[in-house]
Image (cartoon, rainbow, N blue to C red):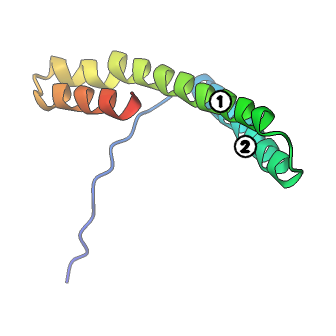
Amino acid sequence: MEKETTKKKLTPRSTEEKKRFINRLSVMEGQVRGIKQMVAEDRYCEDVLMQISAVVNSLRSLGTQILKEHLSTCITEEMKKGNPEAVDEIMNLFKILK
C-alpha cells in the first residue's frame, strides 16, 4: 500500500527576514514567560493585563508584516498565474487576522 503524502506550501524567506521574524518571536516568547512569572507572583491584574496587551499587539504587528509580505510575493504570483483561488485566500486571511 502506497503512503499518501500531502504537499506543503512553502514560502522562501531571506536569511535576514527569517532572522528578523525569529528575533521578534523570541522577544514575545520572553514576554509570555514574564507574564507567567507575574501570575505566579500574584502581581496586580492591571500590570498583567498591560503585558498581555503588549504581547497581543506585537503578534498583530508581526502578523501584519507577514501578511504584507505574503500579498506582495505569494499572492501576487498566484494572481499573475490567473489563479482565482488567490482572492479567496486573501479574504480568508483577512478574516483570520481581524
Q: Residue at x 21, y 77 (%)?
A: 2
Left/right placement of residue 41 relative to residue 15 reads right
Describe the element under mark 2 as helix, strand or loop: helix
The answer to whether one can see residue 14 in this image is no
Amino acid residing under circle 1: Ser
Instruction: Tell me, for residue 32, which label it has, or none.
Output: 2
Q: Quadrant of residue 16?
A: top right
Image quadrant of residue 44?
Answer: top right
Q: Is residue 28 above or below residue 42?
A: above
Question: Farthest residue in the bottom direction?
Answer: 1
From the top left corner, tell me how far across and down residue 74 is, in percent: 31, 25
- Above-or-below relation of 52 to 39: above
Q: First in sequence: mark 1 or mark 2?
A: 2
Instruction: Name the residue beneath numbered marker 1.
Output: 53
Secondary element at image label 1: helix
For label 1, the crowd category at 10 Å Cα-Cα, with few meaning under 14, some 14 to 19 and many 20 or more, is few
Quarter of the rendering occupied by the C terminus:
top left
Amino acid at pointer 2: Val
Q: Viewed as shown, does residue 21 lie left or right of 78?
A: right
The answer to whether residue 53 is seen in the rendering is yes
Look at 60% across and 32% down and name the residue there: 56
